[in-house]
Amino acid sequence: MTVVHLTEHAPAVSVPLPDAAGRAVAASRILDTAAPDPYRTGHWTLRAGSKVGAVSLPVPGGDPVTVRITPKVPIARLFFLIGYSLDPRGWRDGDVEAGDHDELLPALAHAVERQVDRALRQGLLQGYTAVEESALVVRGRIREAEQIRRRFGAALPVEIAYDEFTTDIAENRILRAAVERLLRLPGVPQDVRRRLLHQRVRLADVTPLVRGQELPEWHATRLNSRYQHALQLAGVVLDGSSPGHVAGELRIDGFLFDMNKLFEDFVTVALREAFRGTDRTCRFQDPHHLDEAGGIRMKPDFVLYGPDGEPQAVADAKYKAEKSGGYPDDDLYQMLAYCTALHLREGHLIYAKGNAPHAAHRVRHAGIVLHQHALDLGRGPADLLGEIRSLARQMTAGGTV
């Protein structure tokens, strides 16, 4: 098996690859650049973008090729961003043990296995599930309409419905599906794989989910509190946009995070938490129109509304670092459009990292000020959330947050 190691947003590298493997990587569209190297025969020029993780790609007539993309953000910090986005009030740094792994997939598999082990340490959670079946004895209630439709007046068997107290519930099905998903992925260390196999044995009596089937719903309650962190991480593993997706006619088996989406989720959730307890309302991806006819749609990442229902602030998260020439001008034009349509005097662009923590631009003849803020994702969780709270105060122009 050919294994290609890349780093998120790193410069392009020339990698020795058979043509069939290179074409498979290009067809997957998981990299920003995947093309034959014009200067070196048998090499391909590859460059990773904002997707991180590991995938295994089938190669017609050859061995599969595995692409592993390492994030620039430390693994521990990445898990904090994920956890906070999922549950800002219940998840804190240190809740997830990533082990000594410096690649995303091994660390994620380790973290999921540890969380599942903690969840199942007191035994499998039980709950009530609705069962409908044909039986020779009456249990629960008789489904009279079904009895008449299917049995034509016969007394036996009886169509019944009842609630059964069992371990075959949504929470356990999700954990089993996540464990089995990780066992199929490339790059899971052998020691972690062995522990995952042990967890699968614990969940052997739970009905497996069919691939492509929607995940069963679960709701956080006092009874399943010991499961909640494991279920949240399992949901990340089973996210339909990441593993086992299809690009064109090529099936990809693996796991990918889009850092653009993760950064946007973290920033918008952290801003919402900064305004919690105030009389303001926060909306994500709020749909608006630039023109009066409603033909030009736009969806800012974050819009803050006052108690009167009028917009008070707008923000957009951009997972990109400032280059020597500054941030792209297109971002400023986009924010200017948001401010114009929402009738706001200020707009805020929030970047992953910059040369300075803050820059402001006053638009000529409009009086609109466009702010560019830079967050340092390498900082500790407390400092990072402190930056978000400070940014929230700037967004309200001296208001109380």
Image (cartoon, grey):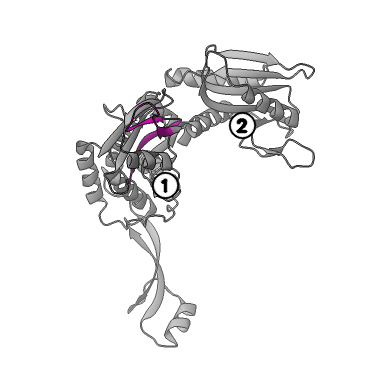
Q: Which residue appears at 30% of the width and 56% of the height?
A: 206
> Of the residues shown, which amino acid type is indicated by label 1?
His
The x, y position of residue 94, in whole percent, is 35, 27
Instruction: Please report the bounds of the magenta region as a residue range.
Output: 34-59
- Residue located at (31% from left, 35% from top): 17
| In the depicted structure, whether residue 222 falls above or below residue 142 | above
Q: Is residue 181 visible?
A: yes
Residue 95 showing in the rendered view: no
- Of 141 and 349, nearer the camera is 349
- Residue sitting at 42 percent across and 30 percent down? 48
Q: Residue furthest bottom?
A: 153
Please state if 270 lies on the left or on the right of 213 as rendered.
right
Provide residue 112's location: percent of width, then percent of height.
32, 39
- The image quarter in which residue 365 lies: top right
On-image quarter of the N terminus: top left
Kindly identify the amino acid type of the residue bearing the numbered disc 2.
Answer: Phe
Evaluate if marks 1 and 2 touch, with contact meaning CB atoms under 8 Å apart: no
Residue 5 located left or right of residue 259: left
| Residue toward you, 251 or 335 | 251
**Can residue 54 be found in the magenta stretch?**
yes
Task: Specify few, some or many for label 1: CA neighbours under 10 Å numbering under 14, 14-19, or 20 or more.
Answer: some
**Is disc 2 placed on a helix, strand or loop?**
strand
In the picture, the quarter occupied by the C terminus is top right
374 versus 206 height, above or below: above
Task: Pinpoint residue 71: horizontal percent, then vertical percent.
Answer: 39, 27
Quadrant of residue 379 within the rendered picture: top left
Residue 216's spot in the image, x, y percent? 43, 53
The label shown at residue 245 is 1
Left or right: where does residue 9 sit relative to residue 207? right
Which numbered disc flags the more N-terminal residue, 1 or 2? 1
Residue that numbered label 2 is attached to: 302
